[in-house]
Image (cartoon, helix red, strand yellow):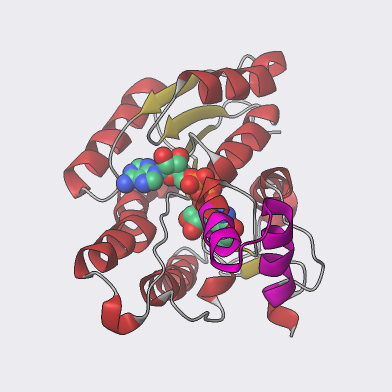
Amino acid sequence: MLNGKTALVTGSTSGIGLGIAKALARQGAHIVLNGFGDVDSPRAEVLAAGRHAGVRVSHHGADMSRPAEIEALMAHAAAEFGRVDILVNNAGIQHVAPVQDFPPEKWDAILAINLTSAFHTTRLALPAMLEANWGRVINVASVHGLVASAQKSAYVAAKHGIVGLTKVTALETATTGVTCNAICPGWVLTPLVQKQVDARAEQHGVSDEEARRLLLGEKEPSMQFTTPEELGELAVFFCSPAGNNVRGVAWNMDGGWVAQ
Ligand code: NAD
C-alpha cells in the first residue's frame, strides 16, 4: 500500500516509534529511523518487516532537542529518499516531579523534544508534501494531550501543545492531499513507562507485576497496556486511502482512560 513512499519516524530506535516504523515498512514504505542507543537491532527488525517489499532503511542520530540537527536529519532524508511522505513525530521523554520541584532544564528538554521538534520537522517536511499533493503528518501525543496527571507538568503541557499543533496543521492543509492527525496512547509498556513501574515497585515495596497492575488500575479501565503494534496499525490507517479526509483528530488508544 505504501510502496515507493518514505516515512521518517523520530525516536524510532525503541518502543512506540519502532512499532510504527515496522508497521509502515510492512506496508512497503522506506524508513528513516532516528533515535539514540543501539541502531543495529531496530534497523534489522524494520528491514525484516519490509523485506518482502524491498524496503530500504536509513538512520540519522539527530538530537531532536537541537534545531540544527533536525535540519540535518531532514536534509539526510531528502538526500537518501527524495522526500519525506510520511512524518511521524514520536520522539519523547518524561520526567515526573511536582511543579515547585520540577527542574527547569527538564522542563526545557521535554518541551524541546516532545513539542518544538515537531514544529521544526513539520515546517521542513510540508513544502515537498504540498508540492506532491500527498502527505501524512502523524503526531504521537498521549492521553496527556487530552487530560492531565499530577507530577507531569512539562509532559502534559507539551502533549496538549502537540494536539494544538496537529489541529492547526490540519486546518492549514485541509484543502490538500496532506493530512495531520495525532495518536493518543494510554499506557504502553516501553522503557519510558517501565521507569515509572520501577519507581512504583520501589515506593510500595511490591513486585514488578504488582506495580504494573497498580499503574494500570489507577488510570486504564481495560487493565491492559496498548501495544506498539496496535499503534502502528493506527498509523497505517491514517496513511491509507480511508484516511484521506481524517484531519485534525486526536485519536486515543487508551483502554478507556479518557472515557472516564
Ligand atoms: P521510548 O523511551 O521507548 O522511546 C523513545 C525514543 O525516542 C527512543 O528511540 C529514544 O532514543 C528517542 N529519543 C529520546 N530523546 C531523543 C532526542 N533528544 N532526540 C532523538 N531521539 C530521542 O519511549 P516510548 O514510550 O516509545 O515513547 C514514544 C512516544 O510515545 C513519546 O512521545 C511518548 O511521550 C509517547 N507516549 C508514550 C506512552 C507510553 O505509555 N509509553 C504513552 C503515551 C505517549
Residue at x 32%, y 24% (from the top left corner): 79
Q: Main secondary structure of the magenta part?
A: helix
| Residue 215 belongs to magenta span | yes
| Residue 1 belongs to magenta span | no
Image quarter in which the C terminus is found: bottom right
Residue 250 rendering spot, x and y as whole percentages: 60, 70
Whether residue 13 sits left or right of residue 229 in the image: it is left
Closer-to-camera residue (47/201): 201
Above or below: residue 220 compared with residue 132: below
Residue 202 rendering spot, x and y as whole percentages: 55, 60
Farthest-out residue, right: 222
Above or below: residue 260 compared with residue 195: below
Quadrant of res 82: top left
Residue at x 66%, y 62% (from the top left corner): 245
Residue 44 rendering spot, x and y as whole percentages: 57, 17
Whether residue 65 sits left or right of residue 41 in the image: it is left
Above or below: residue 97 compared with residue 227: below
Q: Tell me where the magenta segment starts and ends, as one range.
A: 195-219
Residue 233 rendering spot, x and y as whole percentages: 72, 46
Whether residue 39 sits left or right of residue 246 in the image: it is left
